[in-house]
Each structure stands twice: as structure tokens, then as C-alpha cells.
Image (cartoon, rainbow, N blue to C red):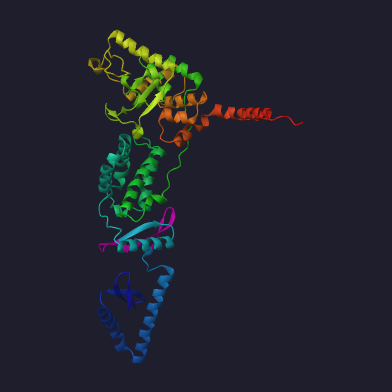
Amino acid sequence: MQYDSTRGKYVVRWREDGRRRVARFDTPEQAEAFEQRLRQPAAEAQSPEVAALAARLAELEAQLSVAQEQADGPGDAVFPYDTRQGVRYGFKFRQSDGTSSTRRGFLSRGTARKAKREMEESIRRGEVKVARESFEAFWTRMLAERKPYLTEGGYEDMETHGRLRLVPFLGPYRLSRIDEDVVREWLATMVERIDHEDPKQRLAPKTVNNARTWLSVALGEAVRRKLLAQNPCEWVKPLPVEKVEIDYLRLAEIDRYLQECPDYYRPLAEFLIGTGARISEAIRVRWDDLELDRSVVRICRQRARRANEDAQTKGKRFRAVLIGPGLVERLRDLRARREEHGTDDGGWVFLCPPVKNGSYARRAEPVPPARNTVHRWHEAALQDAGLRDMPLHCLRHTAAAAWLATGHELIFVQRQLGHASISTTEKHYAHLEVKFMADAAARTEAKIREAGRLVPAAA
């Protein structure tokens, strides 16, 4: 008979038909009585000397068994299992309500033992709670709590990944049952969709990684709330993604592109290239946002993703963008022509052209174009100019590349584009500082020669 301090039970071990048996009792009296009943048949059938020897042997076997369990691992509730990635380890433990549970996904027995000790200590201190709710319920609750702190685009991104990629697979799982194996199974289902025949079902590796990031955020929040002991996403690496260099219109291609833009699109195209604004920001610019005497445009709103409404800019930041005299004159001419023709533009700088046929022919209110409409104008201009295909967002890259090619520094580009950190600008555009790099050596040599002329010659 022994006392198990981890469970608060008295343990009796014996062998029956060559197999080891174990029984646990709440009090030592119960354990001792049971042990006596086990020894009684053997004592009656054997001589006292043989019975005593058998009892002593059984006691020694029990002590040896305990020692082996402590040394080798079996009996400490840590168990191995096979996966596609090789052998992994898990452990069993008692939750705060007394029910049994397991954790899996550890690379070694020692790591599993350490996690088990930490889990049991956390349970004793009341730091880990029993999580019986499903992942779907937890995700829905977390999404509602985070909504006030996310931009509209950030919230929509989180909600979309959860609705389309996380909840359909992980939703029925109890939150406490999600481990590394479950996350890897989910990732495998996402990988199968990378080369899917149906374009609507096909996913890009970057999209899968973004969904994994939101999953890691959710499980990390569960760890913070003591619903999980650890975040299983820590051991599931994101998919490798090939870095594609951004495309943009070179200086010699900008005029070719603008020449092929129709009259209703060219002012907007010049604005996108001259300001580096996102299309969602440009189509919501109003005349009140322009300070043409100071050559400044204030970017303070963007079009909401799913509605024709205003929304905060990305990162909730306003910015003042400097523009050149050519774009200033283009905007002044645009406003003068509308005033001359008595056009009611509703305060919008860029408008959809009048529609003669179709369901929009009856539209009375002036409205700015939708993003998809401008995308079609952009694709047509590229095709007519004989230029390669590139997304409309590349006009923002064109603005940055043009500023850097004409000698402006990255700090200027950062402020024009509205990046929160210069590191973002460096990540995307540092390699385009060709003029700065080309002139650096020449300027250094010139300074050396100039300094040498200031030093008087030796007598």
C-alpha cells in the first residue's frame, strides 16, 4: 500500500494471472482491508513461511514498479503516439472539476512532463479553468469584444477568416481539446485548397497564413484567459510564401498610360499617381479636402468595403499629401468646368460619368465611382497603351517609385503614403532608392576633395 500525493489516494498494487493490477482508496483503512483480502486466499493455501515470502516478494515488486515508473516514464500519465511528423507525446491530468483530460503535441517526453507539472501547478493555484465551450462560441465572443478596437478593414478580415476558414473546421471542437495535431489537420485541409480546381475554393498560401495568424490570436487569447495552458499554433509554422517584387509604371510609361485614359477617368488616374492614395481613399475625396493654394490634399476617409459609405482610413490616421503644380491645375480646371456647366457634383471631386442606358440611367444623385468600376477603367487603359497587366493598387507603387527615382528620401515617401512606421516603407521601397545609391559615392569623393583643398600645403 502506498499514498499517491498527486491524487490524494491510497494505492494498492498486486499481480493477477501475470498482469499488474491497481486499486485506489480514499482512506488507509479501506486500502489495508482490501490488501488483506488479497493475501488471505494465498495464505490459506500455503505454509506460513511461503505466504510471508510471497507477501515480501509482492511488496518488493510494487516498490520496483514504482521506481521504474519514476525513472522511465510509464505511470506518470505521459504517453507517446505516432503522427505523420513522427512520435509525439501527450499527458493526462485532472481538471479543476475532477474530470480527466489530455494535452498532446509535445516533441519529447521531458517536454510533456514539464508541461504536465506546470499544468497541475496552475490548476492547484486556480489559474487554469475548465473550458467546456466550443471554439465557435469562444470565437464569436472574442470577435464581438475586439470589434471596437479594430479598424473596419481589420474587423472584416478577422470575421471573414473565421466564417470561411476557421469555424467550419474547428467550430465543433471543445476549446480545451484543440492541440497541435488538430491545428495541423486544419492546416492540411487549407493546403488542399491551394491548387483547387474551382477558383472560388482556391486559396493562396498568404491567405492561409493570414487565417493561421487569426487562429493564433484566438488561441493566445484563450491562454491569457487561463482556458488553455499553451498556444498550439506556436509549433505549427506558416506556409512558405514566395516574395513577389511589386510592379509599377516606370517614368517613361506614365504618360503612355495617361494618354489612353478616357476623359472621365484621367483626372482620377493623375490623382492616384500624384498622391499615392489608395483607390478607396481617392474616390471619397471632397472639394473641402483640397487646399490648392498650398498644393495640399487631406486624406481623411475611405469608402467602406461593403457599402457606399465613408469609413476611417487604414490605421485610423489622417494625412496631408503634397501635390505638384500640374495636378493642382488639373483639379482647378475640373472644378471650373463643372461650375461652367452647372454640374451638381454633391461635393465629390471624382464622379461616375453619366449613364445613358441600363438601370443606372435614372440615377439623379451624383455619386463617385466604385472600386470595381475604376479597376475596369484601369485595365482598359493598360490594354490600350500596350502595357503589361498590373493591379490598380500599383499606381500607389508608381507614385512611390517616381518620388524615389527623382531624388526624394524614404521619409518623404513614408509621410506621403501615410505609413505608420518607416520600416514599412523600407520593406517595400528601399530597393528603389537608385538615385540615392548612385550619387552616394560621388558625393563622398567630392567632399574628400573639398576637404583636401582646405588643408594648407606643407612648406
Locate the C terminus and report the quarter of the image it occupies. Answer: top right
Q: Quadrant of the N terminus?
A: bottom left
Residue 200 lies, in percent from the top left, at: 34, 34
In the image, 6 versus 170, the foreground residue is 6
Q: Is residue 239 left or right of residue 360?
A: right
The residue most toward the bottom is 48
* Relative to 59, residue 444 above or below: above
Of the pair 180 and 44, the residue shown nearer to us: 180
Decide whether the magenta segment is chiefly helix, strand or loop. Answer: strand
Does residue 91 appear anywhere in the picture? yes
Q: In the rendered view, would you say 252 is above or below 13?
A: above
Q: Residue at x 75, y 31 (%)?
A: 458
Could you tell me residue 392's position as x and y percent? 40, 25
Residue at 36 percent of width and 54 percent of height: 230
Q: Position of residue 330 (x, y in %)?
A: 39, 14
- What stretch of residues is rendered in magenta? 79-100
Q: Quadrant of residue 399?
A: top left
Is 117 on the left-hand or right-hand side of 367?
right
